[in-house]
Image (cartoon, rainbow, N blue to C red):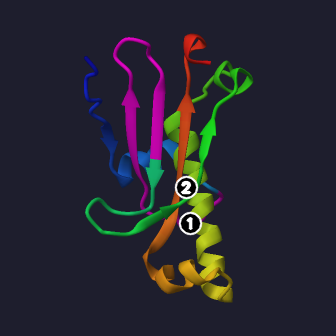
């Protein structure tokens, strides 16, 4: 029987604390949803600049952290996902400003925000 995973949700203040000072840049609000598998221990961090229930769409991607990254002192999938979501939000902002997008994105450009998923797999999950 598969158990449902319940995320730990980090609100924008907690996410901002993870990111620290980004050279004085204004950091958009980022929500991080952390899932940890109870038996195997893998961790999935999903970061988005969309407020819960906002109906906004996250544009980003999925990254599987390599052993070289996960074995680095201080690696944190929450921090990495939040930072990458901020970067994606910057890309979306430039697309809005310059009016560069495909037809589907152009239709919903005001609803699209940055996001990113980072998986920190366990050795058995690789």
In the depicted view, which residue is nearer to us: 28 or 32? 32
Observer-nearest of 28 and 1: 1
Quadrant where the C terminus sits is top right
Q: In the figure, residue 6 lies in which quadrant?
A: top left
Q: Percent x, y for residue 82?
A: 52, 48
Which residue: 44% across, 61% down?
Answer: 49
Can I make out residue 21 in this image? Answer: no
**How many dots with numbers?**
2
Residue indicated by mark 1: 89
What residue is shown at x 25% (from left), y 17% (from top)? Answer: 1
Residue lying at 37% horizontally and 54% vertically, measured from the top left: 12
Identity of the residue drawn at 61% across and 28% down = 75
The residue nearer to you, when weighing 51 against 24, is 51
- Residue 85 circle label: 2
Q: Quadrant of residue 48?
A: bottom left
Q: Is residue 36 magenta?
A: yes
Position of 47 compared to 120: left or right?
left
Is residue 87 visible to the viewer in this orientation of the structure? yes
Residue 6, placed above or below residue 12: above
Q: Position of residue 11 (x, y in %)?
A: 33, 50
For disc 1, the neighbor class at 10 Å (few under 14, some 14 to 19, many from 20) is many
Q: Are marks 2 and 1 in contact (CB under 8 Å)?
A: yes
What range of the chain is rendered magenta? Answer: 23-46
Indicate the secondary structure of the residue bearing disc 2. Answer: helix
The answer to if 37 sits in the magenta stretch is yes
Give the Cα distance between marks 2 and 1: 6 Å
């Amino acid at each position: 029987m598969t158990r449902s995973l319940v995320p730990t949700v980090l609100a924008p203040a907690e996410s901002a604390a993870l990111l620290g000072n980004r050279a004085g840049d204004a950091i958009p609000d980022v929500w991080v949803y952390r899932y940890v598998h109870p038996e195997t221990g893998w961790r999935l961090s999903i970061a988005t600049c969309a407020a819960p229930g906002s109906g906004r769409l996250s544009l980003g991607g999925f990254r599987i952290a390599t052993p070289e990254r996960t074995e680095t002192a201080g690696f944190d999938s929450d921090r990495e996902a939040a930072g990458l979501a901020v970067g994606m939000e910057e890309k979306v902002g430039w697309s809005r400003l310059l009016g560069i997008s495909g037809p589907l994105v152009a239709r919903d450009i005001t609803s699209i925000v940055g996001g990113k998923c980072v998986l920190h797999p366990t050795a058995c999950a690789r």
